[in-house]
């Protein structure tokens, strides 16, 4: 994922957390407010029920008709409050209280009807003695409070039968009042429960808020910390590493960083850096190699200049020795036999050997462009073989040439002579002067293939890639320039030379030269 | 028939031996070790053959060849060259040299070439 996307994502995660917290806090406040409203209503209901009970008591104490109005008023008010409270919370006690209130209202209504009936009928009572008439007012004042005692009074002091209507009414009143009192107590109990329930609810929501704050704060802090850690670990640390690596590469150590698997900008940056470092390393290696080659070629050029100077200077003394030996042989005439003839021959062959060494050095120093001419390759091979015989021992070597009598090529004859001279003398040295030297010429349409094979000791495979290097030699005597010259000449002819060698079984050099057209 | 050869060669030993070898064959031979000295002598007198080294003090073999070819068209010239300067031998051939030899050369080879020129001259004289 790219850093841009990561930043956007982290922003959205943080934003979502903040938004969730804000919504939760808002809902929490709303809920708390509702609970407080509910508590207010519950308290109000509790207060009003107590008032209701007070007026109920007063009614039974004083029988005041005003109290009836109060009781009805409070019942209606409590019912209205219950209706309101139902908006804020769902509590079974609300329904229960509402039911009990209706029950209370009905029972109270019944009692008031019974009471007014009794009150009315009292006037028609006949006391057993006229002096008991004052009791009526006492009964009027207390029958609601103590109906059964008043029934006793009636039985004792008034002319009524045991089962009179008054007694039945009072007994019924007593039962109803007791029932109402019970209902009233229940109402008080329910309202108390309602109030404590509301308090509990408020306490609960406060606790929830407290816990939410205690949980959410560390959680969001943790998430933020993890994001921060991730970003710093993932981006900043990699950038730091890259910085260190770049500093190192500035000092010339092109070490690539571990290949990153990600796809973000930092990974792309690291990959780009790695590519650059690799390219720079390769370029520096190439530069170093080129530099070494340059130094090497400068060295070779210096050696070449020296060698060519020496070669020039050697030419004349060499010629002097050569001519002197020839004159000596001539002068001896018939007497030139045995050891003297051998010695003169040695002098002559050794001067040719020096001539070849000097020639190699000069060729190597010059390595000039070939001067192409129409040339019969068969002539050159034969001429060169004659020259080679003068230089090294070919006495026990059988030379065979398989070729058409004339094969014309576009080549530099002088340079090609050097090629064959080097190949022939190398072959003779490899065979230690005894063996077979084959030269085969295969004329093709565009090129002519020439094979030079010997039956010598072969080239060990470990030195095979060095044989064309200048100054590399395995011989006790030799400049190590021969095959290097062969290679350069053939290369200048824009063709190629191949070598195939089996240790102990001889070597075959194959040269491909362009046909003359 | 007298056949006159002049050798221009700065190497004393080579000059000495060449004169000796050619005189032994019956030719009339004279020589010089300096290009200018050689030209002074050749200018005075016509030779049948001049054998000259290319690298010489005073006047080099190629310039000597040019002067000879200008003055004496009948005189043949054989050029001797170190193998370091085969190119100059080719140049010499283009400028009219009869043949060239590369140092170190075979005496018999030289004698053969001289004999060839002698034969050619003798044939011409007969006619």
Image (spheres, grey):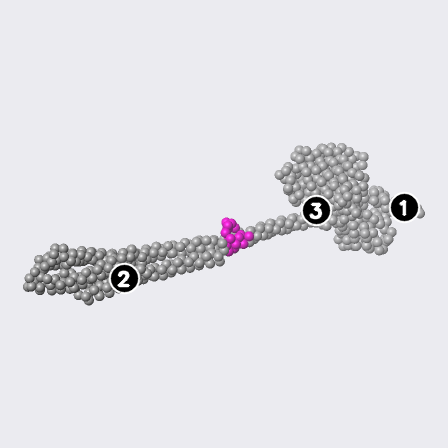
Pointer 3 chain: A
Disc number lying in front (1 or 2) = 2
Distance of label 3 from label 1 (alpha carbons): 49 Å
Q: Residue at x 66, y 41 (%)?
A: A467
Disc number lying in front (2 or 3) = 2
| In this picture, residue A280 sits left or right of residue A87 | right
Q: Pick the residue in front: B95 or A455.
A: A455
- Residue A336 visible? The answer is yes
Which structural element holds mark 1?
Answer: helix
Residue on which the image places disc 2: A79
Label 2: few (<14), some (14–19) or many (≥20) C-alpha neighbours in 10 Å = some
Which structural element holds mark 2?
Answer: helix
- Residue A251, image x, y percentages: 51, 54
| In this picture, residue A272 sits left or right of residue A350 | left
Q: Pick the residue in front: B9 or A49.
A: A49
Instruction: Give the magenta range.
Output: A255-275
Residue on which the image places disc 1: B122
| In this picture, residue A56 sits left or right of residue A502 | left
- Residue A172, image x, y percentages: 17, 56
In which image quadrant can residue A42 be found?
A: bottom left
């Amino acid at each position: 994922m790219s850093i841009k996307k990561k930043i956007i994502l982290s922003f959205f995660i943080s934003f979502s957390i903040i938004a969730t917290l804000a919504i939760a806090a808002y809902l929490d406040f709303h809920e708390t407010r509702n609970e407080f409203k509910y508590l207010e209503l519950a308290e109000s209901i509790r207060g009003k029920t107590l008032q209701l009970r007070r007026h109920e008591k007063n009614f039974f104490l004083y029988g005041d008709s005003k109290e009836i109005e109060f009781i009805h008023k409070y019942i209606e008010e409590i019912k209205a409050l219950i209706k309101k409270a139902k908006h804020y919370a769902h509590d079974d006690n609300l329904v229960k209280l509402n039911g009990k209130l209706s029950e209370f209202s009905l029972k109270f209504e019944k009692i008031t009807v019974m009471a007014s009936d009794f009150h009315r009928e009292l006037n028609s009572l006949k006391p057993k003695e006229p002096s008991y008439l004052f009791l009526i007012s006492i009964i009027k004042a207390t029958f609601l409070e103590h109906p059964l005692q008043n029934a006793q009074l009636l039985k004792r002091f008034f002319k009524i039968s045991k089962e009179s209507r008054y007694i039945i009414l009072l007994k019924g009143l007593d039962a109803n009042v007791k029932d109402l009192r019970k209902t009233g107590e229940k109402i008080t109990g329910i309202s108390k429960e309602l109030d404590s329930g509301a308090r509990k609810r408020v306490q609960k929501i406060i606790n929830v808020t407290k816990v939410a704050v205690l949980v959410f704060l560390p959680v969001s802090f943790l998430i933020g910390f993890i994001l921060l850690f991730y970003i710093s670990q993932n981006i900043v640390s990699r950038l730091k590493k890259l910085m260190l690596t770049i500093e190192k590469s500035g000092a010339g150590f092109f070490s690539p960083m571990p290949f990153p698997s990600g796809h973000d900008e930092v990974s792309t940056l690291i990959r780009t850096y790695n590519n650059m470092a690799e390219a720079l390393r390769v370029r520096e290696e190439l530069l170093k190699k080129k530099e070494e080659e340059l130094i090497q070629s400068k060295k070779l050029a210096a050696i070449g200049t020296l060698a060519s100077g020496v070669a020039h200077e050697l030419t004349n003394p060499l010629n002097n020795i050569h001519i002197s030996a020839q004159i000596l042989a001539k002068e001896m005439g018939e007497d030139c036999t045995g050891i003297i003839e051998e010695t003169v021959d040695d002098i002559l062959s050794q001067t040719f050997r020096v001539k070849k060494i000097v020639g190699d050095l000069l060729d190597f120093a010059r390595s000039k462009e070939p001067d192409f001419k129409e040339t019969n390759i068969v002539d050159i091979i034969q001429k060169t073989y004659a020259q080679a015989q003068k230089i090294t021992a070919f006495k026990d070597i059988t030379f065979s040439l398989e070729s058409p009598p004339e094969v014309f090529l576009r080549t530099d004859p002088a340079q090609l002579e050097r090629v064959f001279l080097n190949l022939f003398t190398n072959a003779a040295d490899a065979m230690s002067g005894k063996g077979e030297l084959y030269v085969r010429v295969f004329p093709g349409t565009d090129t002519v293939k020439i094979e030079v094979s010997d039956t010598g000791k072969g080239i060990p495979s470990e030195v095979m890639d060095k044989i064309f290097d200048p100054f590399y030699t395995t011989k006790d005597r030799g400049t190590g320039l021969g095959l290097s010259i062969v290679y350069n000449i053939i290369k200048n002819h824009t063709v190629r030379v191949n070598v195939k060698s089996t240790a102990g079984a001889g070597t075959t050099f194959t040269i491909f030269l362009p046909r003359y057209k | 028939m007298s056949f006159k050869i002049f050798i221009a060669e700065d190497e004393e030993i080579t000059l000495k031996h060449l004169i000796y070898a050619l005189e032994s064959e019956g030719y009339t031979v004279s020589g010089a070790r300096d290009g200018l000295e050689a030209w002074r002598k050749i200018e005075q007198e016509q030779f049948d053959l001049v054998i000259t080294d290319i690298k010489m003090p005073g006047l080099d073999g190629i310039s000597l060849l040019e002067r000879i070819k200008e003055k004496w068209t009948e005189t043949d010239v054989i050029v001797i060259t170190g193998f370091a300067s085969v190119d100059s031998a080719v140049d010499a051939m283009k400028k009219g040299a009869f043949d060239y030899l590369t140092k170190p050369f075979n005496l018999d080879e030289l004698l053969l070439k001289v004999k060839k020129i002698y034969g050619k001259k003798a044939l011409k004289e007969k006619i």
